[in-house]
Structure formats: C-alpha cells, structure tokens
Amino acid sequence: MKEYPKIPLGIFPTPIHRLPNISKILGTNVWIKRDDMTGVGLGGNKVRKLEYLLAEAKEQGYELVMTTGQAQSNHAMLTAACALRLGMEPVLVLKKRGICSRRGNQILNYLMGVEVRFVDTDSYDDIYAEMDRIAAEKGKPVYKIPCGGSNPLGALGYVDCMKEIADYGQAFDHVVCACGSGGTAAGVFLGGALYMPKTHITAAMVDSDPFDKIVPELMEGTRELLGLNMPLPSVDLVDMCGPGYSIPSKEGNEAIELMARNEGIILDTCYTGKTFAALVKMAREGKFRPEDNVLFIHTGGAGGLFAPDWENM
Ligand SMILES: *Cc1c(COP(=O)(O)O)cnc(C)c1O
C-alpha cells in the first residue's frame, strides 16, 4: 500500500470506550470513538483529513490556504486552526448560508483572527472564482481545500481511523458514522473493508446530495491513491437528513438528549445527533443482537452547537 506524508496535528489514537447506560437502554453493547477529542479547536473529524491535506500543501510550498463551506462550517474553522498552527495563512471563503453572525464557529474564527469572506451564492464555482481573485489580490498561490476536505487524499484520514479502531483490539459487529460531504464515510467504508472486513458499516446521510454516487467515487479515488486493486465495498447509507442540512430534526434532538442525559456526552444538531439517531433507530428495529458490539464514531461539531438560539428551538 502506498503511503502519503501526514503532518502531525491531532492527538491520536482518540479514546474508545463503552457507553454503559446507553447500552442498557438500547439492549446491546454501544461503544464510542471519540473523534470529538482530536485535540485542535474543539475537536472533530476534519483534523484527520487535514493531516494529509496540509502536508501536501506544505510539501508543495504553499503559504496561503483556503477552504469553504457554510457559515457554521466545522471544517472551515478546523482548517483555519490547523493552518495557523503550521504557520500558514488561512482565508475562509464561505457561502452566505446558515448563521453568519458572530455565533458558534464564527466566534472561534474571530478569536483566531481568521479572515472570513462571505459570498452570497449556492454555487461552488463562484466560491472557487472568488478564492482565485483573493489569491491574486494577495499575490500568492493558494492551496484550495474542497468543502469538508472531502477528496481522495482527505479520505485517507478515515482509512487510518479504521486501522486505529482495529488496533484497539475489540471486535465490532457494527460501526455507525456520519456522511455530510462524503469523505469520512468513504474512508470508513474502505478502511473497514481493509482492516475490519467482518464489520457492518452504516453511514447516516445528513444532507440530500447523491451519496450513493459520491461515496463510491471518493472510495475509488482513495483506492487508486493507495495503489490497491481490491473490489470496492458496497455502502449502506441511511437518510437522516430530516427537514434539511443543518436544520435540527426531531429524531436528532431526541438522540442528543439521550446521550447528554445518560452519558454526559454532547452531540451536535447538524451531524452527530442525526447520526446517533440512526443508531438508536437500528437498535429499536432489532438490527443489533444483545451480544453485539456497536461502535458510534463521534465526529465532533461542538462549535456549531452554540450558533442557534436555543430558547426558540
Ligand atoms: C464534516 C463533519 C461530518 C461529516 O464528515 P464528511 O466527511 O463531511 O462527510 C460529521 N460530523 C461533523 C461534526 C463534521 O464537522
């Protein structure tokens, strides 16, 4: 398998532990992988991708890094945090969508002194054109990271995460993770096939993009990077989007409360609450045996949790 340079940014391996109270309630052994504790910003899954992406940027001599997403993007905030740690200049070119005022992740961007530019558009072509314009203005070449850091190189971070989980030494019958831009799920499915071939993986879609195409395409790109010729694993994707991307769902909020009230662990409304709701739903539908070990990957998202006005939720 080919290897790619990775720049150390996070604290790995992240912890894995059993959730005793949730296990009792759901009638199976539920475990959690704490990628909310990756050690940069308020933690989260993007740090694993950025170890590869920013290593490439550094190696190719870039000083200027840009990425995008919505106003409350955890990925954009973590890209800025990681770039700053490496002495690079981040600029966030964000869609003027979601909560744009100084709340949630925008507080963190403000504290880090990050330059944020909003573009009132739904098209990533407009965003990338704006990135080129800003780079020309600064007179520096720019390393552009796509939304969510979801490209084949970024997905390698979650291939590594599956190796980390396999190395922990506890066999898991099921793994449940989030799917927001697809890179995490692509890495988890591919890494699962490589390191935990007996484990059933489910990814919870929290957006309405065609992930049945996006995830296999990303997996194919990552498989090619690794120089492997194994068959691509099939993907089990469940729709947990509810009323829309980043809009809280009833099931998601119930799952957040279940986790908070029984284990003192905090999930977010955009990704991890909806993903944990998928696990709860599977348990209630009898998809898990009492003796099964089921692993939930907590991908972070704390920053965004503080964006909405909870008095009126
Ligand atoms: C980005 C993100 C995800 C989804 O990961 P993708 O690789 O974009 O699918 C899940 N949880 C949190 C907290 C995120 O910020």
Image (cartoon, grey):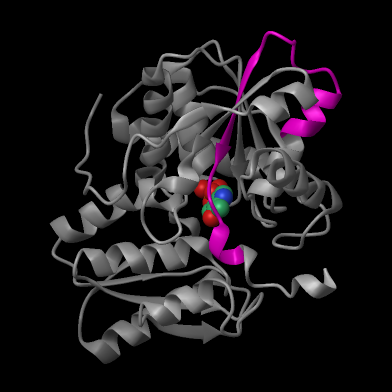
Residue 259: percent from left, percent from top: 70, 42
Within the magenta stretch, is there residue 299? yes
Tell me where the magenta segment starts and ends, as one range.
279-304
**Image height of 86 relative to 114, above or below:** above
**Image height of 291 relative to 42, above or below:** above
Residue at position x 64%, y 47% in the image: 272
Most distant residue in the bottom direction: 137
For residue 229, side relative to residue 137 (left or right): right
Is residue 230 visible in the rendered image? The answer is no
The quarter in which the C terminus is drawn is: bottom right
Q: Quadrant of residue 265?
A: top right
For residue 58, side relative to residue 191 (left or right): left
In front of the other: 203 or 262: 262
Is residue 43 visible in the rendered image? The answer is yes
**Image height of 213 relative to 115, above or below:** above
Within the magenta stretch, is there residue 63? no
Residue at position x 83%, y 17% in the image: 286
Residue 152: percent from left, percent from top: 39, 43
Residue 289: percent from left, percent from top: 75, 10
Residue 249: percent from left, percent from top: 81, 54
The quarter in which the N terminus is drawn is: top left
Total numbered labels: 0
